[in-house]
Image (cartoon, coloured by chain):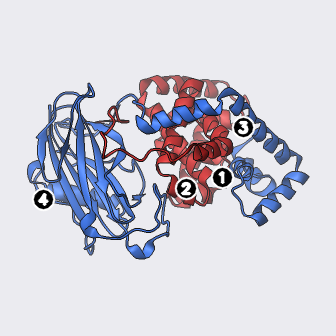
Amino acid sequence: MTLANNEADASALHLGELRLRRFRAGEFSDEAHEEIARHTAECGSCRAKLRLLQEEQRQFERDIPFERFAGGVERACRVPRPRPTRRWAMGSAFGLVAAAAVVVLLWRPSARVGDRGGQDVGGAAGFNRTKGALSAVVRIASASGGAQRSLPPTESTTLQPGERIRLGYNTAAPGYLVAVSVDDAGEVSPLYPEGGGSLPVRPTQHVTFLPDSLELTGSGRERVFLLLAERPLDGAAVKKSVRDAHSRAKGDLASLPMPTFAGRTDVRPFSWLFYKP
Amino acid sequence: MVGRQTPHFQVIAGDRPAAPDSRSQLRELYQKYGASVFHRCAYLLKDRSQAEDAMQDVFAKALQHYAGFRAEASPLTWLMKIATHHCLNLLRSQRAGWRGRYEREARAVRDERPQVFEMRDLVVKMLALVDSETQAAAVHYHVDEMTLDEVAALLGRSVPTVRKRLQEFATLCGKEFSA
């Protein structure tokens, strides 16, 4: 098989694997489902692939019974599994003395309820858009799993060795979330999402915490911003705005102004400052 | 330096993410999508135990955002994207371990030309040589057999950008790319 004929096979002659998986899962409309059923009835290759996928599911159910599956997923919901620390190469000639983390929560208007402009991480139905309901918080926990503490926006704190933070937000309307980090040298790295555009979020009745925790290794300071906006912001624009804010503060994270976006009045920021151990 | 981890601590009551609603949701996920997600994880991680853990993480995300997940035009596509992203992140977090292992395999591929590899085997052997976005594009294109347009839409990138990345990947694989 070559890459050249792969495309032809997938799009013109045969059904792609994902399409067949979706067919097996019953994701297509009646009309599309009928069309694929006709194709698989006539095409031996696709029919064989579909049989393999059906057998794959049967084998999966034999290997991993439902109770084991359900128990594992429920555990993962309660206590997400730790994984090895991933370190980012910030690329600073001066090393990573300090870094600033920026969380950007972008807002979308009530008129867009139900309109999914991207990968939505929550439902979008039936919310009361009240900007006053917006809030954000950072929760800090020790490595030993002892007592936790919260840090409200605009506050600063000194982290103890091994302490990690989780970023939480509370919204009354669907919005988008972006997280980036920036160091003293002005190097910005995305956090939420880790690449691409903004991350849609659904309205919440309580604080919702983002899925990963951050361990701020090394020494120096780190700042967190959280912004709310009615419309999505481009990741590159967020990075540029943070770099500009860093430049305006001459690299002083303690006096870093909130990122701004030209022509945008819908962006609402929150901020925290951390002193790393 | 900054490190990032999945949470080592569970946020205490009041701020806890939503728990799964019911077993019926889980059963539906299990029956419709279980094998697809598990095999994606096993394909990338090459370890069934790790793959089962990763699969559970992916379905936990789906449950925690169930309404949005169900509203997706294709929940399976969403799951496969999340699973791919999650596993590639896990591999990156292992750093030297996986890179060393995969790079040895990539060298073997080059040394053994013109041996014919199944495309999906070739893709996973060459992942260590490319950046994360190209990794995802290659998996969705060559393994999921999505079209160029579909991959671009899934990754939120333009078609020319994805084409360029796949062309570069094809060059590394010693293959011709035309789409």
The residue marked by circle 2 belongs to what chain?
Answer: B
Amino acid type of disc 2? Leu
Marks 4 and 3, Cα distance to the nearest angstrom?
57 Å
Front residue of this view, candidates A273 and A3: A273
The residue marked by circle 4 belongs to what chain?
Answer: A
Mark positioned earlier in the residue sequence (4 or 3): 3
**Mark 3 = which residue?**
A57
Residue A205, percent across and down? 35, 58
**Mark 1 = which residue?**
B146
Q: Residues within 10 Å of mark 4 (few under 14, many from 20)?
A: few
- What shade has chain B been given? red
Residue at image location 18% in from the left, 54% down from the top: A271
Compared across the picture, whether A12 is left or right of B88 comes to right
Compared across the picture, whether B136 is left or right of B16 comes to right
**Mark 4 = which residue?**
A248
Q: Is residue B135 visible?
A: no
Marks 1 and 4, Cα distance to the nearest angstrom?
45 Å
| Location of residue A146 with respect to B71 vertically, above or below | above
The local secondary structure at tag 4 comes to helix
Marks 2 and 4, Cα distance to the nearest angstrom?
36 Å
Whether the residues at callouts 1 and 2 have beta carbons within 8 Å, the answer is yes
User: Do marks 1 and 3 both belong to one polypeptide chain?
Assistant: no
Q: Quadrant of residue B94?
A: top left
Residue B154, percent across and down? 55, 55
Q: Residues within 10 Å of mark 1 (few under 14, many from 20)?
A: many
